[in-house]
Image (cartoon, grey):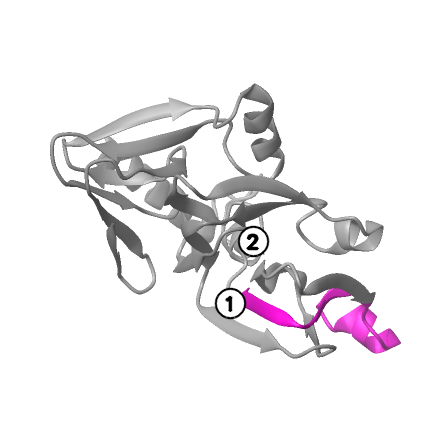
Amino acid sequence: MRYEIHGTVMQTLAVDLMPGETVYSQTQAMAWMSDTMEMDTHTGGGLWAGIKRTFGGGSLFVTDFTPKGGVGHIAFAPRFPGTIVARQLAAGESLICRKETFLCAEKSVALEIFVRRRLGAGFFGGEGFILQKVTGPGLVFLDLSGELVERTLAPGERLLVHAGHVGVQEPSVEFDIQMVRGFSNLLFGGEGLFLATLTGPGKVWLQSMPIMNLAEEIARYLPRPGDSGSSGGAAVAGIGGLIGEIGR
C-alpha cells in the first residue's frame, strides 16, 4: 500500500492498493476511486458494534475498499478544514481520539469506543464520556481540525488545554479537568469554567481549530428571526441562493 496526503488546509488522502489489500472507512468519507475498486458496506462486527460506534461519533456502517483485477486507487476527504495524520500502529498499540477523528485504516486496525471513567472529565471535558479508540497492528489515518501541534510529555509533566483543542492522545497520558483559577478569570477570561489537564508520560496531538469554535463563528453571521432586512441577513440569503443555483 502506498499513500500520499495532498493539500494544506483542505487536505485529501490518496491511497494505492495492490490486489488483496483492503482499507476501510466510515460512510461518507470516500471522495473518488478507480473503477478497479470494490466496495463492501457492513456493520463492522455486527449490529451492536455499529451502534457502539455511533456513540463515539462514528457511523453505523463501515465500508471496505479492495481492488479487483489490478492496482486500485482511492481518495478520502475530511468534512472540515484540517490536518490528516498517518500513524503506523504496532500490534496492540492504541490511540485515544476525539469523536469523528477516524478517517480510514488498514483492515487489521480495530476501531472501537473508549469510555472515560472520571465523572468530571466526562461531563466537562468537551467530548463527553465516549471517544474513539484505534488499535493496531496497521496503518491508520486520523483527521484533526485546523493545524496540528505534537507534544511529548515527560512523566508527571502537565499541560493545561482548552478541551476542544485535544485531538489525539496516547493511552499513557492522563486526561482530567480542573477549574479555572481566579474570580476575574472565571467571569471575564472567556475560557469557560474548566480546562483539560494532560499529564505525561506520552504524546498528544493538539488541533488549532476545534469544530465547535468554527461553528460558533459561523453562527454569528447567520440571519436571526427579524433580521431578513439587514445587510448581513441579505448577504447570507444571497450566498445561500447562489449555492442552491450552483447545486442544480
In the image, residue 50 lies at what x, y percent?
A: 54, 27
In the image, residue 28 lies at what x, y percent?
A: 37, 35
Q: Is mark 2 on a helix, strand or loop?
A: strand
For marks 2 and 1, give the CA distance: 23 Å
Residue 205 magenta: yes
Circle 1 residues within 10 Å: few <14, some 14–19, many ≥20: some
Nearer to us in this view, 218 or 129: 129
| Residue 83 visible | no
The kind of residue tagged 2 is: Ser
The residues colored magenta run 179-207
| Residue 7 position (above or below residue 41) | below
Q: Give the farthest residue toward the left.
A: 70
The kind of residue tagged 1 is: Ser
In the image, residue 157 lies at what x, y percent?
A: 71, 79
Q: Which residue is drawn at 54% across and 67% down?
A: 206
In the image, residue 109 lies at what x, y percent?
A: 45, 44
In this rendering, the count of numbered labels is 2
Q: Give the farthest residue toward the right.
A: 183
The mark found on residue 208 in the picture is 1
